[in-house]
Image (cartoon, rainbow, N blue to C red):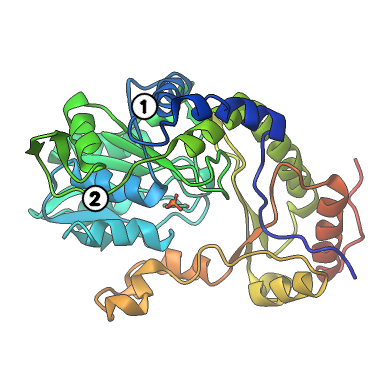
Amino acid sequence: MEKKILVTKSSMPSLEEYVDEIRDLWDSCWLTNEGAKLQKLEQSLGEYLEVPYVSCVSNGHMALELGLQAMRLEGEVITTPFTVASTTNAILRNGLQPVFCDIKPDDFTMDETMLESLITDRTCAILPVHVYGNVCNVTEIDRIAKKHGLKVIYDAAHAFGVRYLGKSIAQYGDAVMYSFHATKVYQAVEGGAVCYRHPETLHYLNALKIYGIQNPEEVVGVGANGKMNEFEAAMGLCNLRHIAQEIEKRKRIAQYYDEQLGNIPGLQINVRQAQTQGNYAYYPLVVHETECGFTRNELLDRLAAHQIFGRKYFYPLTSSFQCYHQAFQPERTPTALHISRRVLALPLYASLSMEDASRICTIIRSMCGLTAERGE
Ligand SMILES: *Cc1c(COP(=O)(O)O)cnc(C)c1O
């Protein structure tokens, strides 16, 4: 029986490093609510992400949901349906209306050329996704937002550590949200963060994440419980020390995939964007069946027969979820619809061995009638 290879695997610090980090919690017995670990993490993240205002929360979804609430928005939010349920749900759970913009076929981010046609007098914000760690056209989105007086909140759940034009992507937008879920490039078991351009919004978020409590006698917002605890913050502190090596290891595998799977008719690999330092969060592969002769699902099935499990990431589009009762029309974002029916994510994580990556490529290449491995 071949060993199972899943699409991702969490990177862990050594047990000793983590135990060292949590040891003093047994002295303080302070486990959550603005603890010392959390404060240290927020400060370290501010330095790493090159932003002055960072607030850590319990998970990426709460970062989005409370992060939006803290911006006091009303009306329509332009976003994309090529994302996880969390992005669209965060908009709806704030009583806001999502308006879906299509994506670009090469990097799968919001097609900014369509943005202006979707702006109405009810539009209050734009919520694009740096999907797979690919950077949205931040310059153009920023220009359009300024012109129309809109806020920009980036879903950067996939993009921890990504840099564009020499700056951390946390510096682009009014707010940037990260997820530190176990499956992300940078993990704190569960966790997330919001970076804001303005300190007032950060202060409001800090109240909202403890039910809206600003001080013992004042509740200033209808908040929730969005606190990150000290054990998660400790995991975050440990993993932040290794983030550069984490990204480097992922890069090696992604580059190998590029070499082996690039320039094959019918297989579309992820673009490597110019002036961008990527984080290699995912390895999306688009299968154009009319050119290669097999479908995305057939490729996934073939891999699964070898105990290798990719994922249909993202399928279906959020705009087609049954819980929304056909309130949205997925056909209005034809590129997103086309890609979601053909895309999959291949296994990619720091501890994936070259041997396993080679096995995966050999299976895919043989489906294309190619030899096992492309030489140097
Ligand atoms: C993971 C993810 C989220 C939600 O983050 P959680 O920490 O899992 O709650 C939101 N948006 C995108 C694009 C994600 O990948």
The total of numbered circles placed on residues is 2
Q: Secondary structure at mark 1?
A: helix
Camera-near label (2 vs 1) is: 2
Q: Residue at x 39, y 63 (%)?
A: 85
Q: Is residue 51 left or right of residue 191?
A: left
User: Residue at horizontal 11%, vertical 52%?
Assistant: 74
For the point 23% across and 60% down, the residue is 93
- Picture quadrant where residue 229 is located: top left
Q: Earlier in the sequence, mark 2 or mark 1?
A: 1
Amino acid at dot 1: Gln
Res 191 → quadrant: top left
Q: Secondary structure at mark 2?
A: loop
Which residue does the numbered mark 1 point to in the structure image?
171
Label 2 amino acid?
Ala
Residue 362, image x and y in percent?
86, 60
The quadrant of the image that shows the N terminus is bottom right
Question: Mark 2 to mark 1: distance in Å?
Answer: 27 Å
Residue 334 x/y as whole percent: 40, 69
Please give the residue where the numbered disc 2 appears in the rendered image.
Answer: 224
Above or below, comparing residue 70 to residue 4 in the picture: above
Mark 1 burial class by Cα count in 10 Å: few <14, some 14-19, many 20+: some
* x then y, percent, for residue 89: 31, 62
